[in-house]
């Protein structure tokens, strides 16, 4: 055993064994150096980067980034080892059940729990009186309570809750609780929410908008509104009705609350945003945040539906505190629909105008959205319905009026593609119509109107990378568009749709981004060489654990199995804003990279000392640090690590991410700001049965610009999954209400999520625009890919049938009604004899083609040039690109309050502005 | 969602089953027969008409038999859909039911006796309580119908099973048994009245099997159904058109519909007129129109009733396609 070279330290005692080396692990102890195909050319590798270099290029070790990888938690899931919310079993647990309102809107007069208390096995009962403080996901609209304080606001609203020794007893106790109600007149039609009401669903005091049920209203005018209509030669106008949809995730909500003997609460919950629950629990339970540990279980799908702090989470904590035992509440599917937070039912009026040059001289949108009984994310949704369709096109003017009203329905909230999906569908269908009116190809029309890279939208959003053009070109080619569009027989069609989405909301809801970062990641490496990542980013199945692991693995040149992610508990993870607004990859991976760079610096320094080579000459490969010119000179990762650990023990580091300063100063300017935006273009091919109105999607070509695919497998999965979800909304999913406002289908038989039979072949196409600020160039891929499928299908239905739909979902009965109408107008008895649309290009087509090709050159130049000259929306209309429109021309003035002239004839949602906020009234 | 607890009995012969029935009746207990359970169990989970005891028929060997003119009530729809012996139209109807997982469990008898469905009925107990229940399951409240209030005492819940129309068209006979003995009727006479009564089954009676007449293989035809999705969904309308080939057109013609009204319907009046004055495609159009006119769906399922009615015409026309090739 004696080896004089090894580990002979000054404390070595004579006769003792030498200090042992920490294990380097198994047979596979030799590294594979670097995968040269993944290393950028600028770094001596073979990866060609047509979009130029990236600031993270020197960190590429050729190990993990860009490789298709199974998610790091996938083995837990496929072997059944993953513990979801309802899998948490604590000893001595009680089962909690909720007493729900049977009325749409009622005053709670009394709650008699005397009979339920008597029932054997009932341990605790709680009512609204036990937790009076309000909460809500947005600090500006905290309008929820654990249980009803005075009124119940929708059928299924929480009134009381029970903890008992088993489910049967808890259910029986629920039956025994007698609640006396005074039923109030309820509102179910969102249009009624605009009127004054005797009992508005909420009372916001002096901030209440008149006596109405308007929760939020937005008015915005950008650009040259005056010339929008006089200059136009093509005008599209449509009134849309979108049904509300639910996320339809697999795992229903489930929560376990447990108070430990020291008086601390641990809440086990499948949450997308543990930090907000953490805050809300502290408010509602009136205990400091440090007394609470929120433990995120595996999440069986979130899609936005698990991002609010929920009343049932409060109930579990209250019951556990009262009973002194752990309490578990698991929803059945009906309860999932009561808590909802799905996409808003919406009425959207969309007007689009184009001038004789085929430029989009104006977009006028009016969106009335049905918020249901609570605010949830609605404040933001109201803005998103407008501002998120001000790109990727350059606009001459943009006018938006939006309003969100309370109705006596389960609350709407954030759902994949938050606030952008419905109005995007309306815009893209409108563009199809504009192209038809101008007799040009709709893809060419789009290509000739795109904003360039490094530009600003009409609302002042900072666009960095933009892969829209490439997306459009790729789907056009892959789908064989030119051979199919307007050339397929009746009942068979093809359509295009585009999308634009934020890659991380620029404004953290709870703090000033200038003072506190958006995301923080901690790293710890001990003797074993494995890296422990502490992050608060919630893996909800989208793969955020994998992304952060890949990022760290790449920078340190390690295989993924040497990385372990600890992201479950607020006790151990740094605060993270959570998994919403597609922020995690962009923000958290950036934070992880900067944390890993700290460690990397330490390792390189240590290796430099051992090898006596300058740091600048060293590179990191797979578990080895070596001289770039002479790879024989180098040390193993472990050797360098142990050198770096001398005198200090385990290496630790912290990295964070904050957004750069962005945006303009008008009211609402922060809504829709993001450090980067994703772009996508889909082509869908459909068959419409003209005799039944039933639509079948045959194939989809789906191109998405995600900046850089860190894990192509995962990006493709997100694209295909988004297609499925969007297809549900466009073809069959809707929350169906009876005339009296009863939700008729709170179950997965009648809430019709597409089955495998409805799922077309989806061809995912990844476009990499290499975002300079994104981690390794990446942007989001989780929400944006949903947007284009809706309009692509609508436009394909038009190509197939000549029917311009304006109501979703396009179920057979809805489409058939339109087919019948058209037959009647054209006096054709058999729908199989209806004419289908045709296209003969006008002269404008070549004008647009040449503009598109010029713009294509312009875009590439802008990407590759070192100096990014400013480009503000408006240049296409002859404005100076260096300055925002409103700063050079008074006609482009930004307005956020309607004038009397507008109010004399407002649009639907715009009429919300007729009310005067209470504090501004003279009385 | 918790099912109320029940006691499960698993007799291995019919006689044993009827002994259990007699014993339960002596104890004043109520029970349900359970075949595949794909309809009963979801209803139990919703606390719809739950009973203290459930008698499973799955261990009774005799009820599983499939041959060319006999199908046991407990034959699984999956097995029926793949059976080479039986009439291909029966196999086709079976193959269109719900999803493959349901078909693996669901049975012919269960499908024939499927409970009628309605948006106001197939809901959880809490949900039904919030609308003060409905006529079909009033829980002792004497509640009115929620689809057509103040109209009559009949229930308009919809019969949404796929097997009945083809069986009716093929002239099948259905065999029933109870502790009091056995009886049989033509399946077209099995269904009765409304969404509550549904069929002629008496207390303690069950379906044992169906048989087909000797001429069964002389019948040709098609079954067409309307659903939102190609899987899972109950039919929103279903039409079976069957015919015997004659020299110039069909020598005999039968049409039956399902998924539109409270019981499946055998349309003898409409077909009689057509067969008497057969004139090819015009007759098909006339037939389809007359079937459309004769059905009266209500608003209690996924699609609008006016649409379902119009689609009956399209389905009739499509199911008749083979008629024009005679």
Image (cartoon, rainbow, N blue to C red):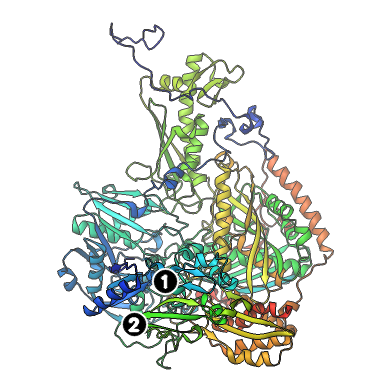
In terms of secondary structure, where does tag 2 sit?
loop
For residue A373, above or below residue A301? below
| Residue to which mark 2 is pinned | B132
Residue A443, given in percent of the width and then of the height, sits at 73, 59
Residue under the image location 47 percent in, 67 percent down? B76
Looking at the rendered structure, which numbered label has been put on residue A128?
none
Residue under the image location 68 percent in, 86 percent down? B251
Residue A325, given in percent of the width and then of the height, sits at 21, 55
Q: A896 or A638: which is nearer to us?
A: A638
Q: Is residue A244 visible?
A: no
Q: B85 or A295: which is nearer to us?
A: B85
In terms of secondary structure, where does tag 1 sit?
loop
* Left or right: A218 as drawn, with respect to A571: right
Specify whether disc 1 shares its chain with disc 2.
Answer: yes
Q: Quadrant of the C terminus of chain A?
A: bottom left
Q: How many marks?
A: 2
For residue B34, above or below residue A868? below
Q: Residues within 10 Å of mark 1 (few under 14, many from 20)?
A: some
Chain letter for mark 2: B
| Residue to which mark 1 is pinned | B39
Chain letter for mark 1: B
Point out the residue furthest to the front here: B214
* Left or right: A262 as drawn, with respect to A525: left
Q: Residues within 10 Å of mark 2 (few under 14, many from 20)?
A: some
Residue A151, given in percent of the width and then of the height, sits at 31, 74
Residue B43, given in percent of the width and then of the height, sits at 38, 72
- Distance, label 1 to label 2, CA atoms, is 24 Å
Q: Is residue A118 visible?
A: yes
Q: A236 or A88: which is nearer to us?
A: A88
């Amino acid at each position: 055993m004696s080896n004089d070279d090894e580990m002979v330290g000054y404390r070595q005692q004579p006769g003792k064994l030498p200090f042992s080396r920490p294990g380097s692990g198994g047979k596979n102890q030799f590294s594979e150096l670097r995968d040269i195909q993944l290393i950028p050319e600028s770094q001596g590798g073979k990866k060609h980067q047509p979009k130029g270099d990236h600031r993270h290029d020197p960190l590429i070790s050729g190990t993990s980034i860009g490789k298709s990888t199974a998610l790091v938690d996938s083995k837990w899931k496929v072997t059944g080892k993953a513990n979801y919310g309802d899998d948490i079993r604590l000893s001595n647990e009680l089962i909690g059940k909720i007493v729900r309102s049977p009325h749409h809107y009622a005053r709670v007069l009394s709650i008699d729990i005397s009979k339920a208390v008597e029932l054997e096995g009932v341990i605790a009962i709680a009512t609204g009186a036990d937790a009076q403080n309000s909460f809500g996901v947005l600090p500006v609209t905290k309008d929820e309570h654990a249980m009803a304080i005075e009124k119940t606001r929708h059928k299924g609203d929480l009134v009381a809750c029970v903890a008992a020794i088993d489910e049967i007893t808890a259910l029986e106790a629920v039956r025994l609780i007698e609640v006396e109600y005074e039923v109030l007149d309820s509102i179910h039609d969102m249009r009624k929410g605009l009127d004054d009401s005797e009992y508005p669903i909420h009372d916001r005091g002096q901030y209440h908008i008149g006596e109405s049920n308007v929760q939020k209203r937005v008015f915005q005018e950008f650009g040259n509104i005056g010339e929008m209509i006089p200059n136009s030669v093509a005008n599209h106008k449509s009134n849309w009705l979108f049904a509300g949809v639910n996320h339809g995730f697999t795992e229903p909500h489930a929560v376990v609350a447990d108070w430990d003997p020291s008086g601390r609460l641990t809440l086990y919950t499948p949450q997308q945003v543990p930090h907000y629950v953490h805050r809300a629990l502290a408010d509602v339970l009136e205990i400091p945040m440090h007394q609470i540990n929120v433990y995120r279980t595996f999440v069986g799908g979130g899609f936005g539906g698990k991002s609010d702090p929920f009343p049932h989470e409060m109930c579990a904590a209250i019951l556990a505190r009262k009973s002194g035992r752990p309490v578990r509440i698991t929803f059945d599917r009906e309860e999932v629909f009561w808590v909802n937070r799905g996409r808003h039912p919406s009425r959207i009026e969309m007007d689009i105008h184009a001038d004789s040059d085929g430029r989009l001289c104006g977009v006028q949108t009016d969106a009335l959205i049905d918020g249901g009984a609570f605010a949830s994310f609605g404040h933001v949704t109201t803005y998103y319905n407008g501002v998120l369709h001000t790109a990727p096109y350059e606009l001459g003017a943009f006018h938006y009026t939006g309003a969100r009203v309370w109705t006596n329905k389960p609350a709407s909230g954030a759902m994949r593609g938050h606030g952008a999906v419905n109005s995007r569908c309306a815009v893209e269908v409108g563009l199809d119509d504009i192209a038809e009116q101008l007799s040009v190809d709709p893809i060419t029309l789009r290509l000739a109107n795109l904003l360039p890279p490094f530009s600003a939208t009409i609302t002042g959003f900072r666009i960095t990378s933009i892969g829209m053009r490439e997306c459009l070109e790729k789907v056009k080619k892959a789908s064989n568009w030119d051979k199919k569009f307007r050339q397929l027989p009746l009942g068979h069609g093809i359509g295009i749709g585009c999308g634009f989405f934020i890659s991380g909301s620029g404004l953290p809801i709870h703090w000033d981004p200038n003072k506190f970062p958006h995301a923080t990641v901690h790293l710890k490496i001990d003797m074993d060489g494995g890296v422990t990542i502490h992050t608060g980013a919630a893996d909800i199945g989208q793969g955020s654990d994998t992304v952060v692991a890949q990022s760290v693995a790449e920078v340190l040149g390690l295989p993924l199995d040497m990385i372990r992610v600890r992201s479950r508990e607020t006790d151990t993870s740094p605060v993270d804003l959570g998994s919403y607004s597609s922020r995690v990859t962009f923000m958290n991976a950036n934070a992880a990279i900067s944390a890993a760079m700290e460690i990397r610096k330490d390792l390189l320094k240590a290796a430099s000392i051992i090898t006596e080579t300058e740091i600048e000459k060293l590179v990191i490969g797979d578990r080895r640090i070596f001289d770039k010119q002479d790879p024989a000179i180098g040390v193993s990762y472990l050797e360098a690590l142990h050198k770096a650990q001398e005198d200090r023990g385990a290496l630790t580091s912290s990295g964070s991410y904050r957004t750069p300063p962005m945006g303009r100063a008008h009211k609402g300017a922060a809504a829709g700001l993001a450090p980067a935006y994703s772009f996508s273009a889909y082509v869908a091919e459909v068959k419409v049965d003209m005799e039944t109105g039933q639509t079948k999607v045959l194939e989809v070509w789906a191109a998405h610009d995600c900046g850089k695919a860190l894990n192509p497998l995962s990006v493709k999965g997100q694209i295909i999954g988004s297609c499925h979800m969007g297809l549900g909304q466009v073809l069959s999913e809707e929350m169906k209400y009876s005339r009296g406002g009863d939700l008729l289908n709170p179950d997965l038989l009648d809430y019709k999520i597409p089955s495998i039979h409805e799922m077309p072949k989806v061809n995912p196409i990844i476009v990499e625009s290499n975002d300079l600020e994104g981690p390794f160039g990446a942007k989001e891929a989780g929400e944006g890919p949903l947007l284009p499928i809706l309009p692509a299908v609508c436009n394909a239905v038009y190509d197939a049938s000549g029917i311009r739909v304006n109501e979703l979902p396009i179920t057979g009965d809805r489409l058939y009604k339109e087919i019948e109408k058209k037959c009647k107008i054209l006096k054709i008895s058999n729908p199989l004899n209806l004419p289908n649309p045709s296209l003969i290009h006008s002269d404008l087509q070549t004008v647009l083609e040449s503009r598109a090709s010029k713009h294509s050159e312009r875009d590439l130049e802008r990407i590759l040039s070192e100096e990014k000259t400013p480009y503000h929306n408006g240049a296409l209309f002859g404005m100076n690109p260096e300055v925002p429109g409103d700063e050079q021309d008074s006609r482009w003035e930004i307005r956020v309050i309607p004038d009397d002239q507008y109010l004399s004839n407002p649009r639907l949602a715009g009429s919300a502005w007729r009310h005067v906020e209470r504090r501004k009234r003279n009385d | 969602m918790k099912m109320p607890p029940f006691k499960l009995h698993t007799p291995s012969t019919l006689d044993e089953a009827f002994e259990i029935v007699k014993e339960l009746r002596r104890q004043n207990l109520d029970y349900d027969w359970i075949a595949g359970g794909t309809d009963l169990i979801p209803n139990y989970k919703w606390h719809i008409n739950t009973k203290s005891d459930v008698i499973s028929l799955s261990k009774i060997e005799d009820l599983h038999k499939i041959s060319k003119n006999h199908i046991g009530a407990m034959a699984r729809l999956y097995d029926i859909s793949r059976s080479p012996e039986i009439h291909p139209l029966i196999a086709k109807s079976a193959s269109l039911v719900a999803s493959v997982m349901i078909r693996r469990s669901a049975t012919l008898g269960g499908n024939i006796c499927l409970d009628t469905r309605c948006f106001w009925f197939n809901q959880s107990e809490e949900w039904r309580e919030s609308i003060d229940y409905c006529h079909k399951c009033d829980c002792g409240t004497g509640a009115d119908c929620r689809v057509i209030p103040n109209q009559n005492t009949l229930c308009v819940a919809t019969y949404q099973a796929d097997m009945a129309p083809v069986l009716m068209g093929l002239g099948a006979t259905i065999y029933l048994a109870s502790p009091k003995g056995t009886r049989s009727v033509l399946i077209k006479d099995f269904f009765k009245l409304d969404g509550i009564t549904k069929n002629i089954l008496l207390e303690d009676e069950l379906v044992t099997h169906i048989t087909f007449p000797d001429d069964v293989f002389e019948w040709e035809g098609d079954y067409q159904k309307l659903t939102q999705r190609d899987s899972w969904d109950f039919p929103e309308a279903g039409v079976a058109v069957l015919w015997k080939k004659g020299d110039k057109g069909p020598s005999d013609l039968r049409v039956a519909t399902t998924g539109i009204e409270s019981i499946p319907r055998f349309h003898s009046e409409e077909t009689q007129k057509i067969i008497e004055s057969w004139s090819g495609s015009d007759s098909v159009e006339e037939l389809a129109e007359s079937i459309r006119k004769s059905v009266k769906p209500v608003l209690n399922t996924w699609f609008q009733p006016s649409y379902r009615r119009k689609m009956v015409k399209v389905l009739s026309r499509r199911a008749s396609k083979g008629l024009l090739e005679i």
